[in-house]
Amino acid sequence: MANHSEHVASARLYWLIWLALIICTVLTAYVATVDLGKFNTVVALGIATFKATLVALIFMNVKHTSEKMTKAILISAVAWLLLLLFLSLADYSSRLAG
């Protein structure tokens, strides 16, 4: 069997992350009411990316893992997301031009 050392985060850290997620959710709802022109989607995706990063690093323990497979899966998931966003934005911009 492999030896696994587990990192135990404090309850205070979990409460702070929860508070940050709630604040980001309220911020997302507020930004949706503000007219930022083309940047509404960019700001919303930025906030969502920050929230997803917090969840993955803290609640999914990616920050304290030493497993190479976990990091490889995370990197491939981010690469796949970026590819899909790039292709979607390329399609959207080509429809505006024509």
Image: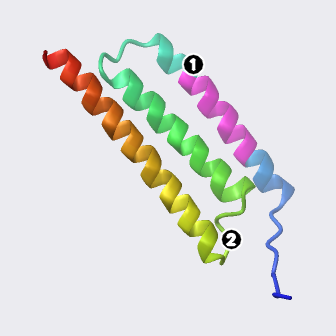
Answer whether residue 22 is magenta in the image: yes
Position in image of residue 38 (x %, y %): 30, 20
Looking at the image, which residue sits at the far left? 98
For the residues labelled 2 and 1, say whether their Cβ atoms are less than 8 Å apart.
no
Color theme of the render = rainbow
Q: Give the dominant element type of the magenta stretch: helix, strand or loop.
A: helix
* Mark 2 and mark 1: Cα distance apart in space: 31 Å
Residue 67 within the magenta-colored segment of the rendering: no
Query: Is 83 placed above or below 89 here?
Result: below
Q: Secondary structure at mark 2?
A: loop
At 55% across and 25% down in the image, what residue appears? 28
Q: Residue 4's x, y, as percent?
A: 81, 82
Q: Residues within 10 Å of mark 2 (few under 14, many from 20)?
A: some
Q: Is residue 40 left or right of residue 93?
A: right
Q: What number is the disc on residue 64?
A: 2
Name the residue at 79% across, 46% down: 15
Numbered disc 1: secondary structure: helix
Residue 50: image location, x then y, percent = 53, 44
Decide: is 62 above or below 13.
below
Q: Residue at x 57, y 62 (%)?
A: 73
Q: Which residue is mark 1?
A: 29
Name the amino acid, label 1. Ala
Camera-near label (2 vs 1) is 2
The residue at the point 28 percent across, 23 percent down is 92
63 or 83: nearer the eye? 83
Q: Position of residue 76 (x, y in %)?
A: 49, 59
Residue type at mark 2? Answer: His
Question: Looking at the image, is 88 positioned above or below residue 64?
Answer: above
Q: Which residues are magenta?
A: 17-28
Q: Is residue 25 left or right of residue 1?
A: left
